[in-house]
């Protein structure tokens, strides 16, 4: 009887997904949901043909060299900046991710952060819970309008377009965006006449800026002190992309000065650590990287990673969603 391929699941996932994978593989799991060190990860990958990973596990050339039997690295996330794709290609290791299934849920959450930050929801709730709500006044907890405002989107992929639809069609917003390439005109029209602009214009014109650009060395601190200074005084910034796209220290300074009116942040440099200056600011809404965290969406993400592993290592049907660099 042919031996089944061995598979490592690096974090705890839904039991039914593990059961599906056990039909095809010899599976090692991480039921304790421990965050393994690099050496621990390498040790557990010995003899494994496949790895089911999240955004937390760095897969680089040195790890691949230490795990010569590895043939597939399948992530349940859409982002894969933790994986050295070129090194994987050089060793014949296929890399997949999980686009599409989290688009609408993540866009919902991006808009939730925008509304909460602009309308001071977190600040108001904390005040109420402290027992400091004693009377009404004309400017009490007055925030910024979202409807009819100019919505800037940095990164106009699937999630950016889903956010644009919500802004233009749901809130009557003027949508401007910056992207490496312009969207087709019919797509722009369907997004309420979205307009592609250069980055400086995006910063200068946006009442609210939502960042959805993938992380890479080219986008590290793409929003830093100089870019924040170009934004409108009182503008709202939302980051649901990746930590490191925004210079968190510079953002904290801009928030403290009042130049940036508020921020909604789901991702941070060095997470799960958060820059302490952000924690002290009242005009921030901070969440622990949960933009895709609805139960149906997380299940869909995990099942897509499982589908990719089964297609690559068990049935030979191939990957459903290879990363763009590996698409034929």
Image (cartoon, rainbow, N blue to C red):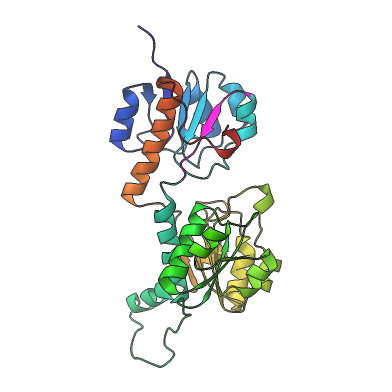
Q: Which residues are magenta?
A: 91-99
Quadrant of residue 14 within the rendered picture: top left
Task: Where is residue 73? Give x, y as percent.
Answer: 50, 30
For the N terminus, the image quarter is top left
Residue appearing at x 56%, y 57% in the figure: 156
Quadrant of residue 316 within the rendered picture: top left
Task: Where is residue 237? Give x, y as percent.
Answer: 55, 68
The reply to whether residue 226 is visible in this rendering is yes
Name, please, the residue furthest toward the front: 186
189 vs 96, nearest the viewer: 189
Name, please, the residue furthest toward the right: 226
The reply to whether residue 287 is visible in this rendering is no
Q: Is residue 114 magenta?
A: no
In this image, 206 relative to 32: left or right? Answer: right
Residue 120, relative to residue 313: is it above or below? below
Quadrant of residue 197 within the rendered picture: bottom right
């Amino acid at each position: 009887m042919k031996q089944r391929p061995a598979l490592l699941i690096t974090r705890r996932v839904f039991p039914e997904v593990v059961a599906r994978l056990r039909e095809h593989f010899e599976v090692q799991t991480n039921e304790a949901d421990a965050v393994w060190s690099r050496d621990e990860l390498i040790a557990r990958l010995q003899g494994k043909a496949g790895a089911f990973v999240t955004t937390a596990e760095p897969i680089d050339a040195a790890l691949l060299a230490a795990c010569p039997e590895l043939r597939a690295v399948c992530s349940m996330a859409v982002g894969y900046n933790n994986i050295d794709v070129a090194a994987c290609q050089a060793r014949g290791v296929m890399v997949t991710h999980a686009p599409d299934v989290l688009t609408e849920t993540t866009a919902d959450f991006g808009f939730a952060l925008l509304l909460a930050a602009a309308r001071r929801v977190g600040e108001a709730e904390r005040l109420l819970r402290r027992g400091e709500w004693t009377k009404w006044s004309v400017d009490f907890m007055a925030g910024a309008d979202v409807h009819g405002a100019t919505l800037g989107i940095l990164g106009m992929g699937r999630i950016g377009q889903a956010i644009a639809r919500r802004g233009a069609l749901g809130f009557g917003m003027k949508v401007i965006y910056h992207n490496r390439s312009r969207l087709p005109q019919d797509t722009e029209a369907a997004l309420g006449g979205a307009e592609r602009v250069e980055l400086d214009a995006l910063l200068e014109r946006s009442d609210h800026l939502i960042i959805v650009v993938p992380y890479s060395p080219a986008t590290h601190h793409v929003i830093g002190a100089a870019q924040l200074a170009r934004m409108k005084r009182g503008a709202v910034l939302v980051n649901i992309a990746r930590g490191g796209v925004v210079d968190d220290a510079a953002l904290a300074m801009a928030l403290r000065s009042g130049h940036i009116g508020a921020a909604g942040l789901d991702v941070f440099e060095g997470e799960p650590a958060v820059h302490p200056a952000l924690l002290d600011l009242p005009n921030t809404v901070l969440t622990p990287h949960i933009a895709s965290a609805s139960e149906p969406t997380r299940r869909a993400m995990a099942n897509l990673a499982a589908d990719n592993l089964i297609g690559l290592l068990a049935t030979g049907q191939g990957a459903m969603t290879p990363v763009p660099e590996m698409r034929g």
